[in-house]
Amino acid sequence: NAGVTQTPKFQVLKTGQSMTLQCAQDMNHEYMSWYRQDPGMGLRLIHYSVGAGITDQGEVPNGYNVSRSTTEDFPLRLLSAAPSQTSVYFCASRPRTVSDTGELFFGEGSRLTVL
Amino acid sequence: KNQVEQSPQSLIILEGKNCTLQCNYTVSPFSNLRWYKQDTGRGPVSLTIMTFSENTKSNGRYTATLDADTKQSSLHITASQLSDSASYICVVSARETGANNLFFGTGTRLTVIP
């Protein structure tokens, strides 16, 4: 069981370039989310989705776009990268059923550096 | 305002020693509290969950406590091992129907030295 898979693990971009961080889960979880983790600031929610075709903004959504065309995939797009987006990004999922206890299942992270 | 605060920010202990990490929260209405362990370069993994009615729960050498009256939780690690070196994150769930109901602490960075 792969769980939550993120690609790439590492990426270096120049300011103004665009890229997509991929996230896939095989647990049939309805809820998927993207977080960024910066030193001293903890995990901050960027965008989340409660099901295919439904997305919403989190705490720090500016500069990022998402879409959810299938239950399994939730890509995060940076349209014009900025140095302030240098961070470690985590994708996480959880069920939205009666068995939901709030446990998030995280991917291994994607470390992004914007020069 | 819903907040989660952890202390200390970082901690260095000798292998074999015990330590206690703290988590204070103001999240309301409270649903549950989770402790996650995050190894360097990895994603966080849930260690234990505490619900309103639970005071203490153990998971091997990890023991979590919850005082719902004072809104405090602790994570006690017994006989520490080098593999305990990690960040420990406290996450509190609010009892709401919305999806965005999780509140994160900034974590405690634990380093166990030989």
Image (cartoon, grey):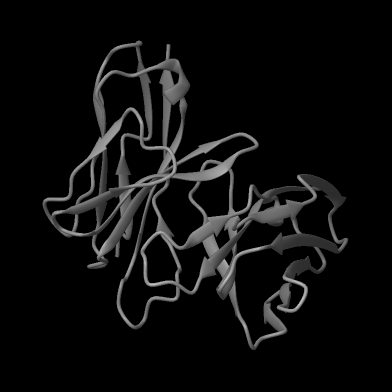
Q: Is A91 situated left or right of A65 in this image?
A: right
Q: Is B61 situated left or right of A110 in this image?
A: right
Q: Quadrant of the N terminus of chain B?
A: bottom right
Q: Identify the residue at horizontal 75%, vertical 69% (top origin).
A: B72
Where A75 sits versus A85, above or below? below
Where A99 sits versus A105, above or below? below
In terms of depth relative to the viewer, which is nearer, B104 or B2? B2
Q: Identify the residue at horizontal 19%, vertical 51% (top origin).
A: A73
Q: Identify the residue at horizontal 51%, vertical 69% (top origin).
A: B94
x and y percentages locating residue B64 in the rendered image: 71, 74
x and y percentages locating residue B52 in the rendered image: 62, 83
Q: Is B18 situated left or right of A66 in this image?
A: right
Q: Is A74 situated left or right of B50 in this image?
A: left
**What residue occupies the far front of the structure in this picture?**
B1
Q: Is residue B114 visible?
A: no
The mark tally for this picture is: 0
Q: Identify the residue at horizontal 32%, vertical 70% (top origin).
A: A95
x and y percentages locating residue B28 in the rendered image: 58, 69
In terms of depth relative to the viewer, which is nearer, B94 or B23? B94
x and y percentages locating residue B31 in the rendered image: 54, 76
Q: Is residue A78 visible?
A: yes
